[in-house]
Amino acid sequence: MTEGFSFLGTIKLKGCVDMQKPVLAIVGRPNVGKSTIFNRIVGDRVSIVEDMPGVTRDRIYSSAEWLNREFNIIDTGGIEIGDEPLLHLMRQQAEIAIDEADVILFLVDGKEGVTAADEEVAKLLYRSKKPVVLGVNKIDNPERKELIYDFYSLGMGEPYPLSGSHGIGLGDMLDAVFSHFPQQPEGEEDEETIRFCLIGRPNVGKSSLVNSILGKERVIVSNIAGTTRDAIDSEFTREGQKYTIIDTAGMRKRGKVYEYTEKYSVLRALKAIDRADVVCVVLNAEEGIIEQDKKVAGFAHEAGKAVIIIVNKWDAIEKDDKTLREFEQKIRDHFLYLSYAPILFVSAKTKQRLHALYPLINQVAENHALRIQTNVLNDVIMDAVAMNPTPTDNGKRLKINYATQVATKPPTIALFVNDPELLHFSYRRFLENRVRETFGFIGTPIRIIARKKN
Ligand code: GDP
Ligand code: GDP
């Protein structure tokens, strides 16, 4: 039925601040310049992960930044919905924007003027009551500016002149977008709640797992403040620890065509990952590992979240004393970049080993948020350097002056060095391994960055 995958989200506490980033979606006819504008706004965000073969990046959803505030951005034009007539396509992309975004950038083509399809989109957006900012693209020079006045007829308020190709007008447009984003209330995220989600392709057993996980718990289901209107989180307390399973809405299909497209499921999964501390990547023991599993796992890794690999349906396969080891090895071979993620073999059906999930979630969440004292960290790094001297390049040797942890979630270590270019991948890996051997860090990626010492 579907090539996509769905997901389940984290749970959040009633009344606590939801720190999720606001979301902007771009809607508009094909060729008005949506992806050009998207790429302009996103800029050259290079992935921190250099070494991840097999992971294709989907440029339909990305984080972005404007005046030091982060937000997420969706290019609905990148969500292929199949061979739909233009008006159906537009309607579906507009619905996605309405469902998924806080503010919509409705993009039109200044060179072409108002078209029937634009008017159709305007009607849909108008009815939704979501804030809309109207951007008139391809206004490449000031003489063309008067072209924008026609677009007042769309009833979307002031049109903002833009030129995606030349990067003109983005600032004023984004100011207007930001004025409509929900105000982030003062205050911190509820640090005590562990937010987790389950992601994986269809039929791996995510819904069954959640039902089994929640079976005994008293669950409070809550709407997420603000945004996505049908996202439902489930929250519960177990042995004194609060948990939130993020957004189970992915399971409760509303029967819309676009819900079955791969890009849409990717989008939903990325949103869930974004809001989670711990991401459980679910595999199906019966079917083994396929390409799509790698893609899902890649997203979790890239996002820098704590990761657990769950192999479900362990009841359904023939086993001998080697089966588990072999499966584990297969996972390690396929997901090289997830070597830090613990693997749990379970059955949602028989509930076999499901009880082991909680201690694992607690442990990886703790590691993800762990902060190491600078002096302790320095001892470990300096011992490592003494054991395996820093590399040289063209006769120049890397010199590490000191190390300090600059961030958690994921733990991020800055090395202050003479020349950041000299910290090659293999030495970085060596240091990471030493840090892991000392502090554990099971279940969390670690980032090591080199900074030039002034
Ligand atoms: P999308 O289908 O809405 O994502 O549109 P694209 O971003 O792919 O752009 C469609 C075409 O319009 C491409 O040939 C772009 O180079 C061109 N284009 C995009 N922005 C501008 C602009 O500001 N000025 C002009 N003249 N062309 C643009
Ligand atoms: P989702 O699409 O990932 O949410 O998967 P579902 O939870 O809907 O499960 C897909 C199918 O797999 C259903 O028919 C379930 O009954 C079955 N299933 C789920 N978990 C298990 C399991 O642990 N063992 C077995 N044998 N079947 C399972």
Image (cartoon, rainbow, N blue to C red):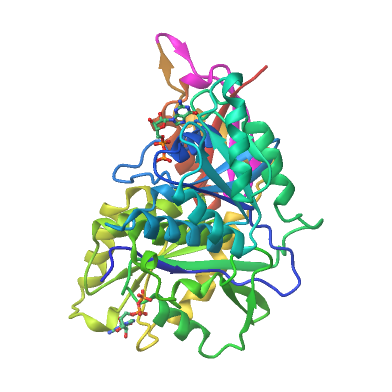
The boundaries of the magenta stretch are: 394-421
**Would you place residue 436 above or below residue 389 in this image?**
below
- x and y percent of residue 318 in the render? 17, 81
Which residue: 58% across, 60% down? 275
Name the quadrant of the C terminus: top right
Residue drawn 57% across the image and 20% down it: 141
**Quarter, ligand 2:** bottom left
Residue 75 visible in the picture: no
Residue 326 horizontal/vertical position (percent): 22, 65
Give 20 or 22, whichever is nearer the viewer. 22
Instruction: Locate residue 183 relative to residue 291 in the image: left or right.
Output: right
Coordinates of residue 397 in the picture (x, y in percent) = 48, 15
Q: Quadrant of residue 232?
A: bottom right
Q: Nearer the viewer, residue 149 or 427?
A: 149
Relative height, residue 363 to residue 379 (above, below): below
Q: Is residue 172 magenta?
A: no
Q: Residue at x 48, y 31 (%)?
A: 111
- Residue 80 position within the rendered picture, expressed as x and y whole percent measured from the top left: 34, 53
Q: Quadrant of the N terminus?
A: bottom left
